[in-house]
Image (cartoon, rainbow, N blue to C red):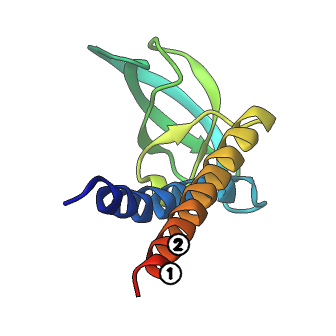
Amino acid sequence: MTRQRAALVAGFFVGPVAIALGLLWLLAFVPGVAEHGSVTTTYCDAKVSRQGPTCAGDFIPDDGGPPRWVTIRAIHEQHVTARAVMFPWAGNQAWPPFGAGDAALFLGVTLTGAAILTATIRRLLRRRSRFP
């Protein structure tokens, strides 16, 4: 496989994946998508990842629903209660509430994916026009 063909394949993979991930996390800012509540950690894993230890505890929704066992990486110690949100696509993972910086990051990922896909399509069209 030539370098040009490899770049086209990579562009057609990386661009759509970045767009999909960016749009998925931008959905977090749509009202009603996230379930708001709080997490009280009762256990933290001794193994430390790049983000710190992974802790787990009970997520208690603000609407008074039943507590659920979740993991959360934003809290790094046991017996701490913090605000959290859960998303339908994130399984049993809770997240700290997102802010404007997170929105800018997700928008940037989406736009970067769109730019990669656009450049890949342009390169493909230029290549096709040179070789009838």
User: Could you say where residue 96 lies in the image, as x and y percent from the top left?
Assistant: 62, 33
At x 51% / y 65%, what residue is drawn?
Answer: 123
Element at badge 1? helix
Q: Nearer the viewer, residue 19 or 28?
A: 19
**Separation of marks 1 and 2 at Cα, in angstroms:** 5 Å
Q: Nearer the viewer, residue 40 or 53?
A: 53
- Amino acid at pointer 2: Arg
**Residue that mark 2 sits on:** 126
Q: Nearer the viewer, residue 65 or 46?
A: 46
Mark 1 vs 2: CB contact within 8 A: yes
Q: Which quadrant would residue 31 be assigned to in this image?
A: bottom right
Residue 121, above or below 109:
below
At x 49% / y 14%, what residue is drawn?
Answer: 79
Left or right of 105: which side holds 56? left
Q: Can residue 130 be seen at all in this image of the molecule?
A: yes
**Residue that mark 1 sits on:** 129
- Circle 1 crowding by C-alpha within 10 Å: few under 14, some 14–19, many from 20: few
User: Could you say where residue 22 lies in the image, as x and y percent from the top left?
Assistant: 60, 53
Q: Can residue 24 be seen at all in this image of the molecule?
A: no
- Amino acid at pointer 1: Ser
Left or right of 119: which side holds 64? right
Quadrant the N terminus occupies: bottom left
Quadrant the C terminus occupies: bottom left
Q: Nearer the viewer, residue 118 or 33?
A: 118
User: Could you say where residue 34 lies in the image, as x and y percent from the top left?
Assistant: 65, 55
